[in-house]
Amino acid sequence: MSRSDPEEEQRGALAQGYRNADLSLEQLWTRYFALGGNLDLVDVEAFLTGLMPLPAAERDMLAHAVNERLDELRSQRRVPYSRVLRQRRPSTGPLAALVQLVEGSRSAPPERLAALAAQAGRSMGLDVAVHLVDHEQRLLHRLSTSGRPEKTPTPVEGTLPGRVFQTVRVLPSEGDPPRLWLPLLDGTDRLGVVEIGVISPGDLYDPVLREQCLWLTSMLGHLVAAMAPYGDDLERARRARPRSPSAELIWQQLPPLTASTGAFVLAGMVEPCYEAGGDAFDYALSEHRVSLAVLDAMGHGLPAALLASAALAGYRSARRDGRSLYDQARVIDQVVAGCFPGSAFATGVLAELDVATGRLRYVSAGHPAPLLLRDGKVVKELHRGRRLPFGLGSAVLTIGEEVLQPGDWLVLYTDGVTEARDPSGAWFGEARLIEYLRRAAAADQPPPETVRRLTQAVLAHQRGVLQDDASILLASWGRDRAV
């Protein structure tokens, strides 16, 4: 087989570089394999000696392995300076892209984010587009450089971009043009995906380019979260339809839907996200302690949203003041009884987990008992720490305790999950909930995707129209894992 002159020149340069790199053939192959190379040692040797050609992507990975070694040798022979010499501002490459994003976002309105991303991509020779997921996590909306979503969204189910969102993995698309799809995250909170057009199919498998694209998308994820509160355009892009005032109030109180400290992962959701009124959840993460809360206020619509928001404010006030679980419950009682006279109440669960030991302390105020999953099975319903709903007072307040084991799942939910009814009147039910969780855990499905699929299963059971809010907060403790 004949080869073009550029290919032969690269082979010759590779062979010469390999001779200068002070590497055995086995050491070169090990470096090449670590970069993602697919050929065996015999094939690499045959290429270096001119006996067989290699695809461009494999040649480039070999070149990268050799160049890394040559850089190591060169740095060992350099004469040191008396001080650190810093580089001037870069004009191209990943650092230039990050600098452009940071500086451009300081005074840009939120709708300019897509244009800033495209400009940063050009510094790296890439075409960059941002796709935001809607609040139901069903559709991905591509932002145009004008800041508004384009007309036809991409479904999360059954598409390559949707699979990237669900699995939080980088995936290639060898179309025309070739594209990389990367998850768009703020920390571990899934906000959408980023579409990156590259020059050639070989770029899709370049490990260095992938790493640089991850830097870029990480910065974009943080900027989406940071810039969104300053305007309505990014928020509007995530809405499939208008949101009721009660849902608007509740969603303004919610923390990010997913969070992680490495050994602890949690994910939550409130449905219906455009009509919700009385459900809310909250959490606080630290190195040593995790605090969790789920609340379900009586009633519907805006009155229920006001009650839930007041209860949530009382909880946060006491928790942030460093007060005990007992005092947090008492403050919620005082807020509900003082601001909503009569028989107003909210059910809920408050919990605190010691991250080092797995010791869980909790209060359950007239609420469905939390579920404890271990090794993919529900091993216990946590029935201790029972008391009257918040706002109705309680002469005796006890604190329930449990010790979690590594890998355990803790599930807090509202009765809207189990009491969702299909047209025949059949409830979703606790048995169906437990079976769903069992299958998700057996499939090693991470908490964020489990919560997304579970809430959509509840909606589907009631044909998309819930008669009551349905909320879930799922926490996994004890193993560092991808979310």
Image: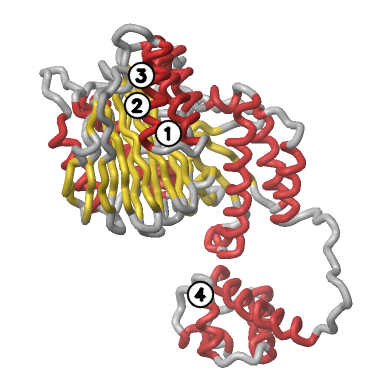
Q: Which residue is mark 2?
A: 295
SS for callout 3: loop
Label 2 neighbour load within 10 Å: few <14, some 14-19, many 20+: many
The residue mark sitting in front, 4 or 3, is: 3
**Does label 2 or label 1 sit earlier along the sequence?**
1
Label 1 neighbour load within 10 Å: few <14, some 14-19, many 20+: many
Please state which amino acid type lies under the numbered disc 1: Asp
**Does label 1 or label 4 sit earlier along the sequence?**
4
Per the rendering, the mark at residue 278 is 3
Question: Could you say where residue 183 lies in the image, as x and y percent from the top left?
Answer: 50, 47
Please state which amino acid type lies under the numbered disc 4: Ala
The residue mark sitting in front, 3 or 2, is: 2
Please state which amino acid type lies under the numbered disc 3: Gly
Question: Could you say where residue 63 lies in the image, as x and y percent from the top left?
Answer: 63, 76
Distance of mark 2 from mark 1, alpha carbons?
A: 9 Å
Residue beneath the point at 75% across and 83% down: 74
SS for callout 4: helix
Contact check, label 2 and label 1, Cβ < 8 Å: yes
Residue beneath the point at 28% across and 48% down: 409
**Does label 2 or label 4 sit earlier along the sequence?**
4
Distance of mark 4 from mark 3, alpha carbons?
A: 52 Å
Question: Which residue sits furthest right?
Answer: 82
Q: Which residue is mark 1?
A: 282
Q: Which residue is mark 4?
A: 34
Label 3 neighbour load within 10 Å: few <14, some 14-19, many 20+: many
Q: Is residue 319 above or below residue 81?
A: above
Left or right: 153 in relation to 224: left
